Amino acid sequence: MDITSDSHSQHISRQFNQELEELKTHLMAMGGLVEKQVSDAVTSLLEGDTKLAIKVRDSDREVNDLQLQIDDECTRVLARRQPAASDLRLVVAVIRASSDLERIGDEASKIARNAITLSESGAAVRGLVEVRHISEHVRKMLRDALTSFARFDTDLALEVVREDELVDDEYGSAMRSLITFMAEDARSISAVLSVMWVLRALERVGDHADNLAEHVVYLVKGLDIRHSNPETLEQQMQQGR
């Protein structure tokens, strides 16, 4: 059975309604924090802002604490309410999504740590154009994935899933370019390796945004589209109706 944003307001227990809404609200708060982490981490690298990078690195604990809080709330809902059907899918989707958001926070911290390393080295940095481009792409994926979760919007979620392949292509192209540059200038190896780690972290952010979008499809349609071919997603969605 498909669900909509109003599907969780029909319970006899008003308290149950409130608990489900709080799960979603807390997940969105965690998403907003992680989204800011990624944005600030990239900014710290592009602008050489070490203080901002340190702030991002140190904020990782806050994200971890939010995940623990959400996990605890989900466990209590499962134990007390024994939800079924769409309510159970909501709890499962929130648990999965919070795990992906925590890992995005980890990737933001990696970007921040590499930003600090590059700033302290004082070396000329190659590859920032690629970092800027890919970061804009994956941040939009993350923003759209969170929006699709908030709105139970499977159409937007599927757009995010399709975008992941484009990010993978951009990442591969950027890495090949940087490898060529290192081969031509051995003195750049250390700095370029740091940029490559940043690009890898951004590519992983895109992967986790893709996961978030897949959780939305599971939540709304009851379909598990993990490991599915993007070209067959429309057919799967039609069959799942």
Image (spheres, rainbow, N blue to C red):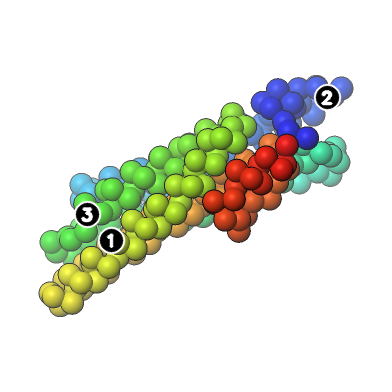
**Residue that carries the numbered disc 3 in the rendered image:** 128
Give the Cα separation between the discs numbered 1 and 2.
51 Å
Mark 3 vs 1, N-terminal side = 3
Is 86 placed left or right of 161 in the picture?
A: right
Mark 3 vs 2, N-terminal side = 2
Image quadrant assignment for residue 201: bottom left
Tell me the crowding category of disc 3: few under 14, some 14 to 19, or many 20 or more residues within 10 angstroms, Cα based.
some
Give the Cα separation between the discs numbered 3 and 2.
51 Å
- Identify residue type, mark 2: His
Q: Contact, CB < 8 Å: mark 1 with mark 2?
A: no
Image quadrant assignment for residue 119: bottom left
Q: Contact, CB < 8 Å: mark 3 with mark 1?
A: no
**Of the residues tagged 1 and 2, which is closer to the observer?**
1
Looking at the image, residue 114 lies above or below residue 2? below
- Identify residue type, mark 3: Leu
**Residue that carries the numbered disc 1 in the rendered image:** 174
In this view of the protein, can residue 21 be seen by the observer?
yes
Give the Cα separation between the discs numbered 3 and 1.
10 Å
**Of the residues tagged 3 and 1, which is closer to the observer?**
1
Image point (38%, 62%), residue name = 200
Looking at the image, residue 140 lies above or below residue 229? above
**Residue that carries the numbered disc 2 in the rendered image:** 11
- Identify residue type, mark 1: Ala
Q: Quadrant of the C terminus?
A: top right
Query: Residue 97 has which mark?
Result: none
Locate residue 83, reporting x and y percent: 83, 39
Q: Quadrant of the N terminus?
A: top right
Locate residue 117, reporting x and y percent: 26, 63
Tell me the crowding category of disc 2: few under 14, some 14 to 19, or many 20 or more residues within 10 angstroms, Cα based.
few
